[in-house]
Amino acid sequence: MTDIKLKLSEIFYSLQGESSYSGLPCIFIRFAECNLNCNYCDTRYAHDIREQLSLAEIFGIIKEYPCKLVELTGGEPVLQDNILPLMELLHSHGYQILLETNGSLFLGDIPSHVIKIIDVKTPGSGEGDSFMKWNLRCLEPHDELKFVLTSFYDYKFALDFIKENKLESSKILFSPLTNVLSPRLLAGWMLKDGLHARLQLQLHKLISIQ
Ligand code: SF4
């Protein structure tokens, strides 16, 4: 095992709060630093490096948890030069890997067994032009596209993006920004439009756990 250091914010064990895996126990490896500056960012603390650990040290921590589902998150995990060896290591030990990424960086070399949960930043984030469209070419059937919505304008942006890029059969997540867009209002729009998308609430916030 190589002694490559990765820049970390935190490692913790909790319930997955988002995506189709919501509600499942999950180990979170939160990497430090991000290349974007979304105006609603709720993990700004992760922009700073808290510690640097080798693959062996990271694996030594996560193997103590009674769980085989791991999410690589941030910050922006793809900024880490050595994220691929970590994916290989986890995969070789039977872990199912979720990669939560902001969609602005190249994802073409992410192994196909990794489940990518890719943000498409809407105008309301302040980073609406950040998405790397090439990444749509490497979508696997198990991958998910997430839109955090702040308004009806963001909702229409998401509908147009889905239509323009022929993503109707992809796994789509609509996440209303907490305390900004009413989930009930969003549900009404989705039902009216007959949208094949999943409305997701941040479960970990609803039950007040990390
Ligand atoms: S991409 Fe995520 S971590 Fe980075 S600024 Fe936006 S919300 Fe925060």
Image (tube, rainbow, N blue to C red):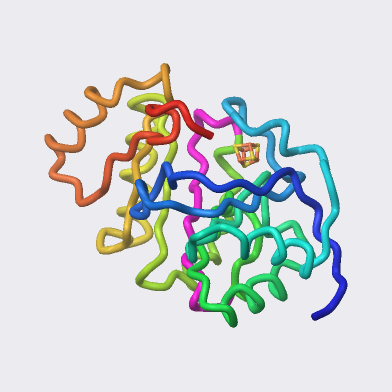
Q: Hey, which residue is sitting farthest top in the picture?
A: 179
> Is residue 194 located in the magenta-colored stretch of the structure?
no
Q: Nearer the viewer, residue 128 or 171?
A: 171
**Which residue occupies 37% across, 30% down?**
176
Quarter of the image where one finds residue 125: top right
Quarter of the rendering occupied by the N terminus: bottom right
Percent x, y of residue 102: 58, 49
The number of numbered badges drawn on the structure is 0
Residue 139 lies in quadrant = bottom left
Residue at x 82% of width, y 65% of height: 54
Which range of residues does the magenta coloring cover?
A: 111-126
Left or right side of 32 for 147: left
What x and y, as percent, mark residue 42?
Answer: 59, 29
Queried whether the magenta region covers residue 116, the answer comes back as yes
**Which residue is rendered at x = 40% and y = 58% of the image?**
144
Q: Is residue 185 left or right of residue 17?
A: left
177 horizontally vs 93: left or right:
left
Residue 193 x, y percent position in the rendering: 15, 40
Q: Is residue 20 shown above or below 18? A: below
Q: Nearer the viewer, residue 200 or 14?
A: 14
- Name which residue lies at 55% across and 66% down: 134
Q: Quadrant of residue 205?
A: top left
Q: Position of residue 31 (x, y in %)?
A: 71, 50
Q: Quadrant of ligand 1?
A: top right
Please determine whether, in this image, residue 136 is positioned above or below residue 15.
below
